[in-house]
Image (spheres, helix red, strand yellow):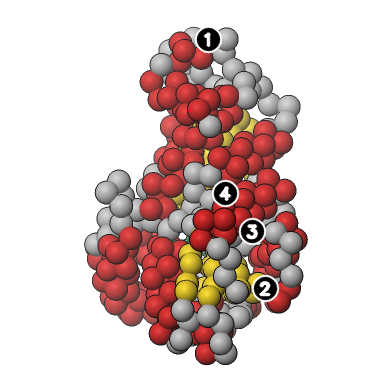
Amino acid sequence: MSFAPEPTFTHGAPPKALATTAILLCNLGTPDEPTAPALRRYLGEFLSDARVVEIPRAIWWLILHGIILRTRPKKSAAKYASVWLPEGSPLKVWTEKQALMLRGYLGKRGHAVEVRYAMRYGNPSIASQLDQLKADGVTRVLILPAYPQYSGTTTASVFDAVYTWAAKIRRIPEFRFINHYHDDPGYIAALADKIRRHWQQSGQAEQLVMSFHGVPERTLHLGDPYHCECQKTARLLADKLALPKDRYKVTFQSRFGKAKWLEPYTEPTLVQMARSGVKSVDVVCPGFTGDCLETLEEINMEARHAFLEAGGKAFSYIECLNDSPQWLAALSELGLRHMGGWPTAAPAEPQALGDSRARALALGAKQ
Ligand SMILES: C=CC1=C(C)c2cc3[nH]c(cc4nc(cc5[nH]c(cc1n2)c(C)c5CCC(=O)O)C(CCC(=O)O)=C4C)c(C)c3C=C
Ligand SMILES: [Fe+2]
Ligand SMILES: [Fe+2]
């Protein structure tokens, strides 16, 4: 293997980024548009990842290309179309906003840290964003997955993409990785704040359902900590809300395929609750840090419909952390903790930064 020459910046043009330290906020990814061809590209990349579907490659290749990529893109595109925003996919819109705000929050606290976002599948890719950071003169990168709970299917796959990029680079930036923050007090407090605000505005339902994305049950037996981390998040959140055990439930959504996934499943649980006389539920999705297809369509549309059809009277969906000030403050704390010892001092004159950086700093100052 040979490595392409890379600029050193010792004699040449100065680097474009003022900060030499960066955070790369990495999310799952989303299609570029809500159309069948875009879904085919996105699902093809996503579902070809051996971290995501752990069955023998040859068999899976036949199922994926012979069945799934022929049928699912059209159905999924229609679902995406139902939640698509004028600015694009909700997952991308929220991730982009969080990255911009995080830079502002850090700036407000006197830290000049570049913050970019990347998608594990689709655009902008992790490799393209790392290329850009390197070209901008960044020498230290903190990898921050958008997933509070660690899973081999998500977190580890983000790390794989970073290692794959680094394997082709001569002068690798210094990396640090955040594995998980499922029990981070700032994350838990931001979630509790969202829920309390909802209760203040709309009243508290009989039951709070905390719905996490599912994974195949087999991953738990193979040592994946995801299930335990979801349970811990839920317990800490209930403690913070002083919610007794009989007032909340932990469920898992988004099952894919025929295998057994983590139980109890969200929608059947909601139907069961309605049938057994529960009239009102609040549903929150603590594992998703930004709203996306899985929360806006699967929960707020499909699960809502199922609960009401089964006799439930009131279904409230509590939106994700999104641009919550508490959440951005917690994220900046988390980032700073993991960047300990790295130079992050802000330049003396933030006004001189111009362009989007000044906008980000101003955003932080307003919050
Ligand atoms: C095939 C298996 C899948 C596993 C394992 C899986 C784990 C997993 N996913 C998330 C977060 C998200 N998943 C999203 C969408 C989505 N997930 C799967 C499949 C698996 N996920 C598919 C096929 C899709 C695409 C939509 C569809 O066709 O149904 C999303 C939303 C993306 C968006 O564009 O809005 C998120 C977020 C986690 C956290 C996780 C394991 C812990
Ligand atoms: Fe998923
Ligand atoms: Fe789904």
Asked if marks 4 and 2 touch (Cβ < 8 Å), the reply is no
Relative height, residue 14 to residue 236 (above, below): above
Q: Which of pointers 4 and 2 lies earlier in the amino acid sequence?
A: 4
Indicate which label's residue lies in the foreground, 4 or 2. Answer: 2
Q: Residues within 10 Å of mark 3 (few under 14, many from 20)?
A: many
Which amino acid is tagged 1? Answer: Glu
| Percent of width and height locating residue 199 | 57, 59
Q: Which mark is residue 11?
A: none
Residue drawn at point x = 42 percent, y = 53 percent: 91
Residue under the point 71% across and 49% down: 184
Residue 188 pos. (x, y %): 67, 52
Dot 4: what SS?
Answer: strand
Badge nearest the viewer, 1 or 4? 1
Q: Which residue is mark 4?
A: 145
- Provide the secondary structure element on which disc 2 rests: helix
User: Which residue type does callout 2 highlight?
Assistant: Arg
Mark 1 surroundings: few (<14), some (14-19) or many (≥20) residues within 10 A: few
The answer as to whether callout 4 falls within 8 Å of ligand 1 is no
Separation of marks 1 and 3 at Cα, in angstroms: 38 Å
Type of residue at label 4? Pro
The answer to whether 74 appears left or right of 295 in the picture is left
Can you identify the residue that label 2 sits on? 247
Compute the Cα span from label 4 to label 2: 31 Å
